Image (tube, grey):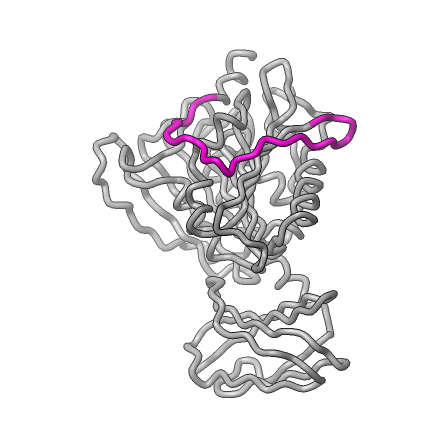
Amino acid sequence: MKRILFSLCFSFIVFVSVAQQQEYLYFQYDSLNRVYARYVPTVYDGSTAVPLVICLHGLGDTITNFVNIGMNYVADTANFIVLTPQAVSSSFGTAWNSGASYYGYVLNGNVDDSGFINALIDSTEANYNIDTNRIFVTGFSMGGFMSNRLACDLNSRIAAIASVSGTIGTSFNPGTPNPIPVCHFHGTADGTVAYTNDAYGMDAEELVNFWVGVDSCNVVPIIDSIPDIAADGKNIVHYTYKNGNNGTQVEFYKVIGGDHEWLVQPTNDISYTTEIWKFFNKFPMQNTAIHSEKTNDFSFYPNPAKDLLYLSFDKYMKGELAVFNQIGVLVKTISVNGINQTLNIADYSQGIYFLRYSDSITQITKRFVVVK
């Protein structure tokens, strides 16, 4: 059992070195002295709220190794902060209380890792200008299992997750989480977390079907193949399950011939790190959009709309109204100073948009549809 469990550790490819903005810090939580790496890109100046990406390593790994997946280099151009926390040591090396288990054996089952990640988000928000609607989690192997657990445990806080070679563990009951965008990568020849007959949790396609059901996506996916250019003995098929509730969707990269590894370019046909950020960048404000439907701080009509959108606030409001398209690109900002507001949408393309009102104490997001 020790041999099998420990095989969840160092199976990804190290391919870059860390940059100078990387800091290694300690964080006291639940009587444990935890350690994490924090990367703040040089382009960050605090004037604009930026996304937060949390990266979770595999069993037995360390943060000094896992930062080498290169998320920091994506952050340099996309302007987001990266946290890479380290799991607590166990008899099999560092291990997340992720839900992954082997014949009922759970590593660090008494460690509150979900609470630790939640507190780490709180601390980062207190010290940096974080866009609380764009908090994302990704992980490899046991970190992938932990990412799926956090999609359930911190469902109201995390906007989307991406897991690589890690599913939902047999010792964790996911219940019925709210819809959340999910992306999963798995090799059919994975010799550690098997594509089928997974000893630690759900099989790869079982996981995908679970999230498709949670999100109520189209059960028939859009299928496309990644161009097979690299001579790596792998072929990648990409499945996209669209039209989930609250704008969610599920994506699945089936790597035919792929092992327990993190693919990189140019050695492979895709870079997991790059594809994960592309996926995350489609889904800002997801959780806020879910909760905002319960608020009554402002209303608008008509919806769907064509030329004009009429807004009515329940009380006098002074703040800013921002409009984002479905993939999170800022379309327009206008000042709010009163009770009523008119938004001209005549030149907007057909599709789904989000309205976000914010001031010093309030942030509300709602969705509207433009038709032509």
Q: Say which of 92 and 361 sits in front.
A: 361
Indicate whether 189 appears above or below 285.
Answer: above
Q: How many marks?
A: 0
- Observer able to see residue 338: yes
- Across and down, in percent, residue 369 comes to 51, 76
Depth check, front residue: 212 or 232? 232
Answer with the quarter of the image where residue 101 lies: top right
Is 92 located above or below residue 162 in the figure?
above
Where is residue 322? Give x, y as percent. Answer: 57, 72
**Residue at 68% from the left image edge and 84% from the top image edge:** 312
Q: Residue 153's x, y, as percent?
A: 67, 43
In what quadrant of the picture does the C terminus appear? bottom left
* Residue at screen point 46% across, 42% down: 184
x and y percentages locating residue 227 in the rendered image: 24, 45
Does residue 161 appear to the left or right of 278 in the view shown? right
Q: Please give the range of residues in magenta.
A: 10-33
Question: Which image quarter is the N terminus in?
Answer: top right
Magenta span has 26? yes
The answer to whether residue 80 is magenta is no
Residue located at (49% from left, 29% from top): 66
Q: Is residue 176 visible?
A: no
Between residue 161 and residue 337, name the one nearer to us.
337
24 relative to 281, above or below: above
**Residue under the point 64% across and 41% down:** 174
Of residues 58 and 266, the one nearer the viewer is 266
